[in-house]
Image: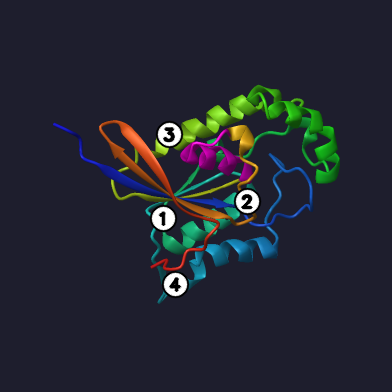
Amino acid sequence: MSSKKRTIIVDLLRHGQPEGGEVLRGRIDHPLTEIGWQQMKSVTAIDAVLDNDVATTPWTELITSPLQRCRQFAEYTSQQTKLTLNIDKDWQEIDYGTWEGMLLSDWRKEAANQFREFRKDLSKLAPPEGEDYPTFRDRIVSAWDAIAAKPDGSHVLIVTHGGVMRVVLPTVLGMQLNRSYPLHIPYACLSRISLQVEDGMVSASLLSHNAPIKNPI
């Protein structure tokens, strides 16, 4: 007898603009700017779901990276919706090691040789004293695979990072991870994915990308 088919909806949300300027930001724990807050509120329409001080949203579960630029908004959303918040370090950004905090203009020069090699071999991206790309990829893929174990009808909001989304989205779309540069993932980018699980097999479809929630209730 075949197992019951399950459907799980996942909203992947990149954090909004953080403080600290145009620097390489992996594990640096910068908070959101006011603009960043508004970006995330706008794309999720979270303030629009308030009805007599009780919020109703499509989500059944909230997951966030522990870093402030993600966690601050996730905590706010949890408080407004009364949904339990799971703070999960597996959803945090890659550790850039000694590159952390570098001006992006300087980092692009510093890392240029690694990225040229990365286009041919994933293992070549290895930030000094940081997290090499294959380790980062495996961490994210493992966290993503675990979502498929959620109950039928689950709708999960995951507040995370641009680098994380550059692993999940290409995985869903069947793209090479080192060729994901055509994907535009700005601050507060929201992507919605549908997972169909049956007989141990998981299929994923990208329902929308970089699109706001229009009907949150």
Measure how far apart labels 4 and 1 are at the Cα level.
14 Å
Return the residue nearer the eye: 84 or 196: 196
Q: Which mark is nearer the camera, 4 or 3?
A: 3
- Name the quadrant containing residue 149: top left
The residue lying at 28 percent from left, 43 percent from top is: 6
Q: Which residue is mark 4?
A: 50
Image x and y of residue 11, in percent: 46, 52
Secondary structure under the numbered disc 1 in the rendered image: loop
Q: Which residue is mark 1?
A: 83
Q: Are marks 3 and 1 in contact (CB under 8 Å)?
A: no
Amino acid on which the number 3 mark rests in the picture: Asp
The residue lying at 47 percent from left, 57 percent from top is: 78
Q: Earlier in the sequence, mark 3 or mark 1?
A: 1
Q: Earlier in the sequence, mark 2 or mark 4?
A: 4
Q: Which residues are magenta?
A: 162-176
Image x and y of residue 199, in percent: 25, 32
The answer to whether 188 appears left or right of 110 in the picture is left
Amino acid on which the number 1 mark rests in the picture: Leu
Q: Which residue is mark 3?
A: 145
Amino acid on which the number 4 mark rests in the picture: Leu
Q: Earlier in the sequence, mark 3 or mark 2?
A: 3
Q: Which residue is mark 2?
A: 184
- Name the quadrant containing residue 2: top left
Measure how far apart labels 1 and 2 are at the Cα level.
30 Å
Q: Which mark is residue 21?
A: none
Image x and y of residue 51, in percent: 40, 75
